[in-house]
Amino acid sequence: MRDFLILKLHGPMQAWGEHTFEGLRPSANFPTRSGILGLLGACLGINRNDKDRLENLADSIGMAVRVDTRQLRRSAGTLKGLQVVKMSDYHTVKDAREDYVGLKKHDTIQTWREYLYDAEFTIALWNHTNAAIHLNQIESAVKQPLFTPYLGRRSCPISRPLFESRLQSPDILTVLNAIQPIGGTLYSEEKIGNRMKRVRDVPLIQQPRQFASRNLYVYGGDHVPE
């Protein structure tokens, strides 16, 4: 049996950043590895410039993300799936990098920031061998965060506690089948099935704002969102 920590990411808005320039700030369709590590780092009280602790955290855990179907109960008692909506919010920013590169500044630019509305995710975490930061520490941190956790951006507060459960289970599919709502699309770093999606969201701790790629194995759902 293996040890899993289960978290729930619920909020009116979420934003899980993809490759970005100053003008367009897109969001992925589900939480990125860098985003989850940032969330956990905030709960643990790790400063952004503490590269050793950030690297220890990144090397200590594996993760899987399930995209849950939010259910809306009608007056007649029937259930209807609530569709996730992606929308852009318009901003202006002062003192941005000129042409979005280099160090030279200019007064104001326009930006468009994407957000997910009505999204809910279940996260499964497990320890790698010889982990420096254990699930016990992470569980305590998400129950009593040292820094305020948010869902990708500071404008995206959580609407329920992050902690859901701590379970022993033989594998990822079994443990997530014990967590409501059953179903959804699962993206796992550990192999499940034969469908695979390659994403670039692994933070290079020693090279800020640089990312490596990883393979995600996909289970369930009708298609793989890009």
Image (tube, rainbow, N blue to C red):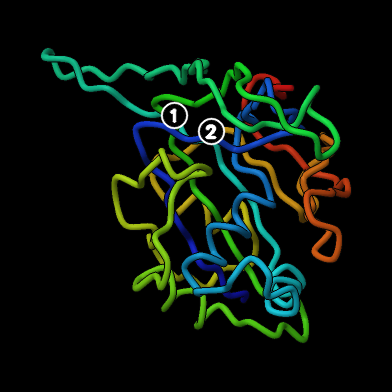
* SS at mark 1 in the image: loop
Left or right of 47 on screen, residue 193: right
Outermost residue toward the left in this view: 75
Residue type indicated by callout 1: Thr
> Mark 2–mark 1 contact, CB under 8 Å?
yes
* Position above or below: 40 against 160: below
* Position above or below: 86 against 129: above
Which one is in front, 214 or 51? 51
Residue type indicated by callout 2: Gly
x, y percent for residue 159: 29, 45
Residue in view at x 69 percent, y 51 percent:
33
Crowdedness near tag 1: few (<14), some (14–19) or many (≥20) residues, C-alpha within 10 Å? many
x, y percent for residue 61: 69, 69
Which one is in front, 194 or 34? 34
Residue marked by disc 1: 69
Instruction: Name the N-terminal-most of marks 2 and 1.
Output: 1
Residue in view at x 55 percent, y 77 percent:
135
Residue in view at x 44 percent, y 70 percent:
166
Find the distance from the CA under tag 2 to the CA under tag 1.
6 Å
Say how many tags the image has.
2
Quadrant of the drawing holding the N terminus: bottom right
x, y percent for residue 71: 32, 26
Residue marked by disc 2: 184
Quadrant of the drawing holding the C terminus: top right
Q: Which mark is residue 25?
A: none
Left or right of 61 on screen, residue 83: left
* Position above or below: 135 against 86: below
Crowdedness near tag 2: few (<14), some (14–19) or many (≥20) residues, C-alpha within 10 Å? some
Left or right of 24 on screen, residue 164: left
